[in-house]
Amino acid sequence: MQYQRLSAEHYAADWGISETGRFGKVKEVNQLGQKYALAKDGPDREALLLQVMRYFHPYLMKYLDMITRGHLPSFRDKVSKDTLTFLGYLLKKGEGAPRQSDYLQIARSLHLAFKQHDADDIYDVLALCLLRAIRRYDPHYTDRIKRVVEVIDETVSAQVLTAAYVSRRVGFNSFGCLRLLARHGFLAMVKGENEKVLEYQRASWPPPSKFFQVGAIGFTYFIQKWFHFYLKEHLDRVMGQLESKEGVLQLDYRPGYGMSASYDCKGERPIPSEDGDIQNAKGRTWAGDMSLVRMPLDVAKINLDWVRKTDDPLFSRLTRNQRYLIYLRFSEEKTWPEIARTLCRDVGGTRELYHRLLGMLRDMTRAPETAKTAHTNQ
């Protein structure tokens, strides 16, 4: 598989895929993960963490490649189950069994959550999600559940069980253990407003002895599950911010330019406005191209059918080639070199054609208003 490359300055740039491509040795990785989780804080534990990160480097590169290239990574013509599981979390529910084209559509849209991020930035986000998952791993989780079950057994059957009460008794945060017992049907959750869990009640109690004979949770299984959760959490947060910004799909984003905007006082990465108020470390100024925002067009409806024919009173006056240029720029979000190759033109001529087209559209949208003003003055 041809992976996306990190810059030479990135800390993981020399972590070759062939060198670290031992992720298939699940037993070896599980042992290393448990060793890290049980180690005491210090340089030795940090060295183990670095070793774990190097094992998962090909895993992160797979997701980096999917985000930047917008395709489904495959091995021997098969898409990994892990990839499909993650993309399945992002599919709309209740629309029947997903097809591979549905997964591909989601994969192609992932880059929207990483606008103005280069490959190094995206890798760092993925690495942070991985680190959160690694630090959450607890090889003694089964023992914790046993302790929670013992505390529940010691209480009166009619007593209300809350996470705060159980946590005080066991001496650690028992929320995850209670949720696990509820998911397996041993406890029932009593919810209040906004689906908030208020308390727990015994259901199919007690859990059978075989429930505690599974041993330590597999490290690789746990990490993949929680990596998916933290990455989805990041995507939901970022996409929610983007959707709240008018015209975000029309931002003049130039992938591959190494944009890395500074964070504002709230720790959030700002979104460029049309004033060009964002500057990267190299002094490059970034602005949002809001030209089409002021025009009567729902950008979400720009597709190839729209290119072939549209009933829009404004854009129906354009040629197919002109609408195709708008489609490539705003729907496909292609770079100028990519658009130029598609249209069989040079980059400079393509940009000039684009700006002439926008100028023509502005004149067309101002024409009715100008005519109305002239009529009023008469």
Image (cartoon, grey):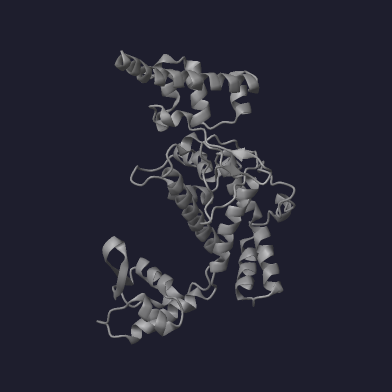
- Where is the C terminus found, in terms of image quarters? top left
Residue 337, how many percent across, how many down?
63, 27
The image quadrant of residue 203 is bottom left
One can see residue 73 in this view:
no
At horizontal 55% and vertical 48% (from top left) the residue drawn is 80
Q: Is residue 2 above or below residue 339?
A: below
Given residues 83 and 169, the one toward you in this image is 169
Residue 19 or residue 280, whichever sits in front: 280
Q: How many circles with numbers are drawn on the protein?
A: 0
Q: Is residue 342 above or below residue 116?
A: above
Q: Residue furthest front?
A: 377
Q: Position of residue 209 (x, y in %)?
A: 41, 78
Q: Is residue 282 left or right of residue 162?
A: right
Q: Quadrant of residue 69?
A: top right
Residue at the left extreme of this rendering: 158
x 53%, y 68%: residue: 136
Say which residue appears at 49% left-offset and 26% top-offset.
327
Q: Quadrant of the N terminus?
A: top right
Residue 194 seen anywhere in this rendered image of the structure: yes
Q: Position of residue 100 (x, y in %)?
A: 47, 39
Residue visible at 48% across and 18% down in the picture = 360
